[in-house]
Image (cartoon, rainbow, N blue to C red):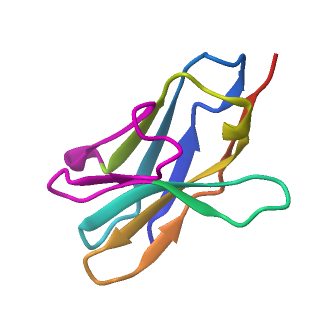
Amino acid sequence: QVQLVESGGGLVQPGGSLRLSCAGSGIIFSINDMGWYRQAPGKQRELVARITRNGNTIYANSVKGRFTISRVNAENTVYLQMNSLKPEDTAVYYCNAVQINGITSWGRGTQVTVSS
């Protein structure tokens, strides 16, 4: 089982930036896809961005042009650069990893709050 630990969340004003990091450990099989999801109070968890092992990316429409996902395969690490943050980006952000054997792992989440 992969252990995923997120960091980088916090409180930021509208228009500000944050960079989330997620580091994986305990990995036996190579990680295929990695991604970021978020869950706001009273809402379902939703995809923010995903990245494949060879760097192909997809983004939720609501974050396109503002967020950038990247990864370092050798370090089993994925990042989410978030710019031009809006109050509606407030949520708990979760890291996700899918190994080549199909096993999916989740981090415990990191809180992002966008407020003046």
Determine which quarter of the picture holds residue 46: bottom right
- Residue 90, horizontal then vertical, whole percent: 72, 39
Picture layout, residue 4 above or below residue 17: below
Determine which quarter of the picture holds residue 53: bottom left
Residue most extreme to the front? 61
Picture layout, residue 57 above or below residue 99: above
- For this rendering, which residue is in front, 24 or 21? 21
- Residue 107, horizontal then vertical, whole percent: 57, 58
Residue depicted at 65% across the width and 56% down the height = 108
Q: Which residues are magenta?
A: 49-75
Residue depicted at 45% across the width and 75% down the height = 104
The mark total stands at 0
Q: Is residue 110 magenta?
A: no
Residue most extreme to the right? 42
- Residue 75, horizontal then vertical, whole percent: 28, 45
- For this rendering, which residue is in front, 71 or 1? 71
The reply, left or right, for residue 12 in relation to residue 30 is: right
Residue depicted at 71% across the width and 39% down the height = 88
Picture layout, residue 97 above or below residue 6: below
Picture layout, residue 89 above or below residue 59: above
The reply, left or right, for residue 101 in relation to residue 46 is: left
The reply, left or right, for residue 109 in relation to residue 26 is: right
- Residue 2, horizontal then vertical, whole percent: 44, 67
Q: Which quarter shows the C terminus?
A: top right
The reply, left or right, for residue 82 in relation to residue 34 is: right
Q: Which quarter shows the N terminus?
A: bottom left
Q: Is residue 67 magenta?
A: yes
Residue depicted at 83% across the width and 54% down the height = 41
